Image: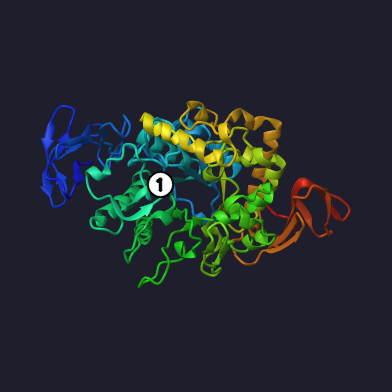
Amino acid sequence: MPSFDVWAPAAERVELVLPEETVAMTRAGDRWTTDRAAADGQRYSYRVDGAGPFPDPRSRYQPEGPNGPSQIVDPATFAWTDDAWHGVALETAVIYELHIGTFTADGTLDSAVERIDHLVELGVTLVELMPVATFPGDRGWGYDGVDLYAVHPAYGGPQALARFVDACHARGLGVCLDVVYNHLGPSGNYLSEFGPYFTDRHHTPWGAAVNLDAPGSDEVRRFIIDNALMWFRDYHLDALRLDAVHALVDERAVHVLEQLAAETDGLATSSGRPLTLIAESDRNDPATVTARADGGDGGFGLAGQWADDVHHTLHVLLTGESQGYYADFTDPGAFAKIARTPFFHDGTWSSFRQRDHGRPVVPALTPGWKFVASLQTHDQVGNRATGERLSQLVGRSRLAAGATLLLTLPYTPMLFMGEEWGASTKWAYFTDHQEPELAEAVSEGRRREFAEHGWGDAVPDPQAASTAHGSTLRWDEVSQPEHARLLEWYRELLRLRRAVPALADPALGVTDVRRDGDVLTYTRGGYTVVVNLSPQEIAHPLDGNRHLLAGWDAEPGDGVLTIAPDGSAIYGPPVEE
């Protein structure tokens, strides 16, 4: 059973505030405790040196939001049925990123359970939830969470998350959760009332850095690592996606990521199932995923990391956009390079950064499955001015061509919700800040940012409820012919990826690419992929020993494959299933 215990090293007085009374707590080193028993469902908060009351920094539930009291949650009350679940390994994973609030019309974890079968039939193996830690209001992306241990009440709270994970496991799906340790949101953030959770020794785009290496950082590191272990242990999660780890500034000899990876591996060993850490990193450094070594000469030892260079290359190929960081990826040789290694910038000049960037990947140390690649993500869609999806930028046929490229590369593929049917709904940036000044600042900042790029009044107001509503998937589209055809193509590509090991082979440095203008041809393990991004129909040679395994607007003829603009084909030896 949980107990009342809080870290407040500089406090001279800490009180436990209960609905019916206030109880003085006892100092025990840097912590404060009481012999008062905690009961499941009980609400409470803390007063520190007369200020407050404040929610518990390790609160498991904030039923009234980040400014209200905390509520005791006993994980022993979760009704699990997944004893036979043995986990999912990243080596064979297909990831599906979704936002609970806009995945269904109800926007809850329980309503998301109703769509699990769709994901299973699609061929997904690992569902990645955008952050569920409590944030202000009901609507938001979740990256401004302030109660990192508490499941957002608008999504259904902790019991609902347990039900969702249990239901996924029952259908053979693993669950990954996006967690944010590099900053906390500005609203409802009371951590500094308790202790030195932040330090001005380092700075991030969000202000003072999380204190990972200054005085008091031992407890802050435990705050982060214990949080990660809680999701694995108490909620039976299979993986965590760590947001922007390059902003975790840590000058200690053992970086917090290395410590987290080591403790996660230890828990995986004791639990008997794989537990996976996937980093989002802007550094293009394979050390994020290379193995730890005694003496500190190895990497951090995380299982995987996002490969944004793969996304950028595919995006430029499909859209022709070249602004900002996309400029370097207009290089005609970009696709050939990322087909062999996940980092286009591996020590090369980055015009966007105005410096050299990245480090080469050593194929023998880092197989391709360690790198998560995508055509679309919440960032790449939602941070556009109006939240256009790729299907809205280039059409469903060209998106189908992109899917062919993504799902035949040597990386772990990730889809963004609705991508598989070319959803007509955009996915924009939305918030629900409760303070009028902050709400106006966010809305005005968004307008000003994109006005500089010429979008002006077209930018949706993040605070408007209609912006989140307009970003919600419409599941009635799935059965409409134009959407159903694309959905079937995604299913076919994922089926073929399972049936033909060569197409999912994670070996780096071996993909043979030929580019003839806007026609891409590459071979992997005896199988050939052709993608026609040109505006003309092409006739591609096809000898008699090869068979068309999958084609989008591609027709086999007498010794040739006729492929329409934006068409694609995969051919090779017959597949025995």
Left or right relative to 439: residue 501: right
**Closer-to-camera residue (459/65):** 459
Foreground pick, 461 / 84: 461
Q: Residues within 10 Å of mark 1 (few under 14, many from 20)?
A: many
* 388 sits to left or right of 249: right
- Tell me if I can see residue 551 in this picture: yes
Tell me the amino acid under the disc marked 1.
Val
In terms of secondary structure, where does tag 1 sit?
strand
Question: Could you tell me which residue is drawn at 58 percent across and 32 percent down?
Answer: 458
Q: How many marks?
A: 1
Q: Position of residue 50 (x, y in %)?
A: 14, 37
Q: Is residue 449 above or below residue 272?
A: above
Q: Is residue 526 visible in this depiction of the protein?
A: no
Return the x and y of residue 563 as percentages of the image width and height.
80, 49
Task: Give the x, y percent position of residue 125.
Answer: 53, 47
Picture residue at 39% right of the left edge, 47% below the top: 206
Horizontally, residue 347 falls left or right of residue 259, namely: right
- In the foreground, 553 or 92: 553
Q: Where does the N terminus fall, quadrant-wise?
A: top left
User: Relative to residue 540, is residue 463 depicted above or below?
Assistant: above
Residue shown at 62% from the left, 35% from the top? 423
Q: Position of residue 219 (x, y in %)?
A: 25, 53
Colour convention of the picture: rainbow
Q: Quadrant of residue 46?
A: top left
From this view, report whether residue 474 is shown above or below residue 491: above
* Residue at the spot of label 1: 179
